[in-house]
Amino acid sequence: MSPAGAGKADELVPDVTVLGAGVVGVCTALSLRERGFTVALIDRNPPAEGASHGNAGSLSPWSCVPQSMPGLWKNVPQWLLDPEGPIALRWGYAHKFLPWAVKFLQAGNLDRLPTIADAMLGLTRPTVTLYRHHLTGTGSEDLVRDSVYVHVFRNAADADLSRLAWRMRAERQVPLEVVKGDALREVEPALSSDFEAAVLIKQQGRALDPGGIGKALAEKAQGMGVTFLRRSVERLIPGADGAWSIETDQGAIPAKKIVVAMGAWSKELMSGLGVTAPLEAERGYHLVFRNPGVTLNNCIMNVDAKFVVSSMAAGVRCAGTAEFAGVDAAPDYRRARVFEGMIKRMFPDINTTDTVEWMGPRPSTPDSVPYLGEIPGFTNLFAAYGHGHTGMTMAPKTGEVVASVIAGEAVDIDMTPYRIDRFG
Ligand SMILES: Cc1cc2nc3c(=O)[nH]c(=O)nc-3n(C[C@H](O)[C@H](O)[C@H](O)COP(=O)(O)OP(=O)(O)OC[C@H]3O[C@@H](n4cnc5c(N)ncnc54)[C@H](O)[C@@H]3O)c2cc1C
């Protein structure tokens, strides 16, 4: 091929190829395109059908409390033994889970919490503003609503702002208020009076259809010139001069710069390159109650049982639980069905006859902080995965940060806590 021909072929290769079209990949593609890059987005499925489809839709600009907290380990045995408990482990998977679990418990160290909390907040704060910006012109603007995050307690004494997690929030100016009795019923009239009190986290958002938001944004990205390729990515092969070859089920695709945003599936792809940053699939479940007969005004967290309930476009969605079984193990929908009894105890008037169940894997790092930015030891390879329980919230800022790094712009947050090599 003549040099001129070679030039033309090179022009056909997009500046950046984003692997994974969950909310993280889609938001990253949008932010890159806004900066003028040509972008390809690759996914084996249509956009936003992984974890991004079925999450609880809480868009919390104040999320700064990681999953691993001091003393949490004391609850683990009791949670594991309770079939309605918030965590489950398939025993055949225990040996693979253990190394991550050790790092997870180590992350819940008092000394590490301030850095972790600030790193989380760095990605969560602008979520509602950025979603509204990205959704402008899609016709789906209405899918993000203003909300309060209502953390409900059966026992009023448990709504105690002196506890560590609430103190961490208060120190970071999170707007909190304790409400009790009738005042709580005013906020959420359908809630059972068995719940005596709540802590309200104010000024946040909720998604009425998280997957629908992902799809609307993917459509917008395509309208802006992003190419969507439906392929299964199998391997990444570094080439000469910093270029890459992406091996897929339908042949190899040349790439200049790659962003890995394949959520919980990123670990296996990266291990092919020798990158062993810890990541676990924290498989969550949801149950949607169609025709519920009750409407909730906000996202509601049942703090004791650790699940979230919200009125969405398709009905009332109950989402939560963490099952460790490996990313691609078959779902165990008993984990979703437990929500039926639990929701009836929260909202006695709810109609539970018409349900849809779902499972999806949260891509969880031990410290609840995702892996972002350049991957040491490689050229033109960037991480955007590991968003755990707060990826719906963190996705738009993640896109901004990763696009800024690739563009060589000054990034407005310290990138150190997101380094992929922080666990050694
Ligand atoms: C039950 C539950 C409740 C949650 N609630 C909330 C909440 O209220 N608020 C919040 O902020 N977050 C919440 N989350 C977390 C949030 O959903 C995730 O962190 C987020 O969706 C992760 O997005 P992602 O784009 O990284 O991954 P995903 O959405 O999983 O996307 C990964 C993509 O990679 C693709 N892919 C995988 N392998 C390949 C391959 N080999 N080739 C090509 N493509 C591939 C997949 O098809 C998928 O589309 C919740 C999660 C769960 C499970």
Image (spheres, rainbow, N blue to C red):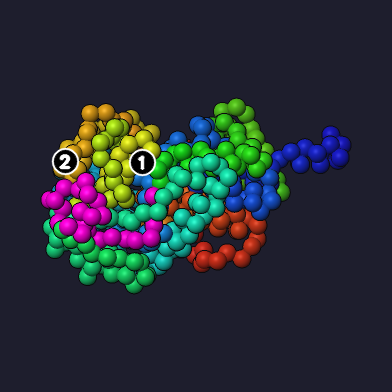
Compare residues 379 and 350 and report the one nearer the observer. 350
Measured from the top left, where is residue 389 in percent x and y? Answer: 36, 50
* Residue type, numbered disc 2: Pro
Residue at 29% in and 32% down: 291
Figure quadrant of the C terminus: bottom left
Residue 147, image quadrant: bottom left
Q: Identify whether 90 is placed above or below 75.
A: above
SS category of the residue bearing label 2? loop
Measured from the top left, where is residue 183 in percent x and y? Answer: 20, 59
Task: Measure the alpha-carbon separation of dots 2 and 1.
Answer: 19 Å
Figure quadrant of the N terminus: top right
Magenta segment includes 202? yes
Report which residue position mark 2 lands on: 348
Residue at 60% in and 42% down: 221
Q: Which residues are magenta?
A: 182-206
* Residue type, numbered disc 1: Met
Q: Are marks 2 and 1 in contact (CB under 8 Å)?
A: no
In this rendering, the count of numbered labels is 2
Report which residue position mark 1 lands on: 312
